[in-house]
Image (cartoon, rainbow, N blue to C red):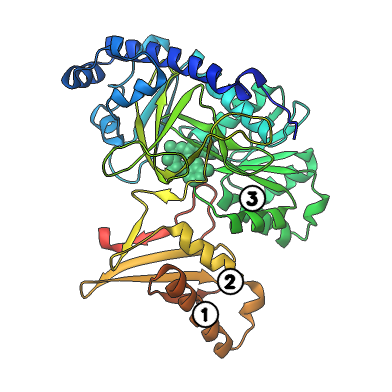
Amino acid sequence: MQGNYFQPEIECASREVMHYIQSKRLRRLVERCYQNVPVYRKRMDEMGVLPGDIKEIEDVRKLPFTTKTDLRDNYPFGLFAVPKAQLARIHASSGTTGKQTVVGYTKADIDAWATGAARSIVMVGGTKEDFVHVSYGYGLFTGGLGLHYGAEKLGATAIPVSSGNTKRQVQILQDYGSDILCCTPSYAMYIGETVRDMGIDPTTLPVRAGIFGAEPWTEQMRKEIERLLAIRAFDIYGLSEIAGPGVACECQLQNGLHINEDMFYPEIIDPDTGETLPDGVYGELVFTCIGKEALPLMRYRTRDICSLDHTPCECGRTLVRMSKPRGRTDDMLIIRGINVFPSQIESVLLELGMDPNYQLVVDRINNLDTLEVQIEMTEGMFSDTVRNLESIEHRIANALQSTLNIVARIRLLEPKSIPRSEGKAKRVIDKRKV
Ligand code: DLL
């Protein structure tokens, strides 16, 4: 399958060429970190590693890991490798606990990030003729500005709608004729429901593709969004610490997300031992920002759980692919000793024909963990008899027990009773932590 590429010389480069680029950039990165970031110099000295020891990309394994705690401990700018005057932009991720993680970019960093986002838009079939409707939040969150700059870099037209006011979003999709919609998958669901409630036939909307990410979502949710909006829905991945959206994105084949590995070198490690794991094995994704100036993190532990695939893709790209993240090391729920990710529960619910409007409430009662799955009834179920509803609850509980081995209480709620999200959805309420 022959595709369109934004930068074929990189996206379709041979492994040898990529190895050369990565090795060269890693050497420069390590030199820069050793000279300009005292925390890294100290760690490397403690480990007995000098910049001269780093020759090829595989030598990345000799370097120290970086964690979110390191960013917090050096809040706000302690890991920056350039003087303040060279910064062009600051973003931050709003952690639910503790201090924000503050990240900085030079002009060159912004340009590289925009390039990654532009490549992503082309991967999903975007061209410079397209109107790119950006409904991620603008501001300190990287979603809005990231795709905005990507669209402009490509030469397409960015529509900076930002999130919120969902009926107006639909009106803009309709009146301006947006071709590509960018937002979180949960917001895409909400926009899709609003299209339906406004009585609009989604096939009459010009929008043909969606670039959805910033939170985990399942294949079943993809089908639901594609049906509601009559589009193809693509997954985009990123994190503020590395760059925002555009670290990786799906191509037309939707078989893994191509990582912009000339900028962000990925590894999968065993989260417990730190050992590197081979292709196909799930573990924690780690990135080294080999192309960055302002915040060139070494071996940053994302806590996202995925696997890598270095085989060439039929789209023609050779960029390594990561699997859809299956969860985070810190999202994993342990319920009575059983490990489970919210995305696994979502899969079971959607397989049973439920809509992806649910919340998981975890508690500890009499020293025992409890899980309540609250899920909205579909419109069709709402008029069902009590007996029918009880049988649906049983069916869901049985499916969770037989597929995931977890015992859950199921509570069916009225349609539209769970608050809709305009950004990242909050799926889990863990009362054990309060
Ligand atoms: O969410 C950046 C982004 C914006 C990505 C828009 C895609 C689209 P943060 O707020 O720093 O940055 O959150 C990063 O979100 O470590 C993952 O746990 C999760 N995440 C991001 N994309 C995906 C995805 C942005 N496609 C954290 N699938 C990451 C699953 C994702 N999880």
Query: Mark 1 = which residue?
Result: 395
- Which residue: 75% across, 43% down? 207
Query: Is residue 340 toward the left or the right of residue 425 in the image?
Result: left
Q: Quadrant of the C terminus?
A: bottom left
Q: List x then y, in percent, for residue 47.
A: 19, 22
Badge 3, how many Cα within 10 Å: few under 14, some, many 20+?
some
Kindly identify the amino acid type of the residue bearing the numbered disc 1. Arg
Residue 395 visible here: yes
Looking at the image, the residue that sits furthest to the right is 204
Q: Quadrant of the N terminus?
A: top right
Q: List x then y, in percent, for residue 275.
A: 31, 37
- Which residue: 58% across, 73% down? 377
Query: Mark 3 = which residue?
Result: 166
Residue 417 visible here: no
- In terms of depth relative to the viewer, which is nearer, 94 or 52? 52
Q: Is residue 381 above or below residue 84?
A: below
Q: Which mark is residue 352?
A: 2
Q: Provide the secondary structure element on which disc 3 rests.
A: helix
Disc 1 under 8 Å from ligand 1? The reply is no
C-alpha separation, residue under disc 2 versus residue under disc 3: 28 Å
Kindly identify the amino acid type of the residue bearing the numbered disc 3. Thr
